[in-house]
Image (cartoon, rainbow, N blue to C red):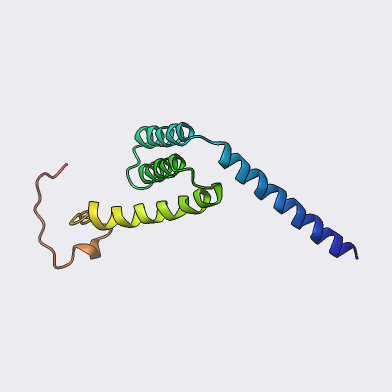
Amino acid sequence: MRLISFISLLLMYDNFGMDFLLSFIDSLQIWHFLLIALFVLIISTLAGDTDILPWIAFSLFLVGLLELFNVSATFQLISLPIFILISLLLSRKYIYIGEENKIAEDISSLKNEKIRIVKINN
């Protein structure tokens, strides 16, 4: 009996948490999303990150654009990770074309490779 009341209490609390989250997202306006995206972009610039954070900022910008069309908070919540995954996959596919890692991790990666020595430090 106690287990059933505990489970029902957890379900009720979980529903309250989701309602609070959806009402919070629904209360945000477009400029909130754009400011958060700008903040993430500034943090990524200061940290020197070009791999993930700019694409998260771009995804937040896209979710902010969804706010222009009065899309529901549930759809915004679902679309953010989808936008992040799509932007990361497309950035790897189209932006980083032809860039190979030319840094040798260990000596075995240099086997059967031609190298040019420019300078030797003593």
Quarter occupied by residue 86: bottom left
Q: Quadrant of the N terminus?
A: bottom right
User: What residue is rendered at 46% in x and 37% in y?
Assistant: 33
Horizontal arrangement in the rendering, residue 113 relative to residue 56 (left or right): left
Where is residue 22? Give x, y as percent.
61, 46
Query: Residue reaching furthest right?
Result: 1
- When the figure is inspected, residue 34 is found, relative to residue 55, above or below; the finding is above
User: What residue is rendered at 36% in x and 46% in y?
Assistant: 55
- When the figure is inspected, residue 13 is found, relative to residue 2, above or below; the finding is above
User: What residue is rendered at 10% in x and 50% in y?
Assistant: 117
Number of numbered discs present? 0
Query: Residue reaching furthest bottom?
Result: 112
Quarter occupied by residue 21: top right
Nearest the viewer among 111 and 122 is 111
Where is residue 109? Give x, y as percent.
23, 63
Horizontal arrangement in the rendering, residue 2 relative to residue 16 (left or right): right
Where is residue 61? Give x, y as percent.
40, 40
Where is residue 56? Give x, y as percent.
41, 45
Horizontal arrangement in the rendering, residue 69 relative to residue 106 (left or right): right
Q: Quadrant of the C terminus?
A: top left
Nearest the viewer among 14 and 50 is 14
Nearest the viewer among 44 and 107 is 44
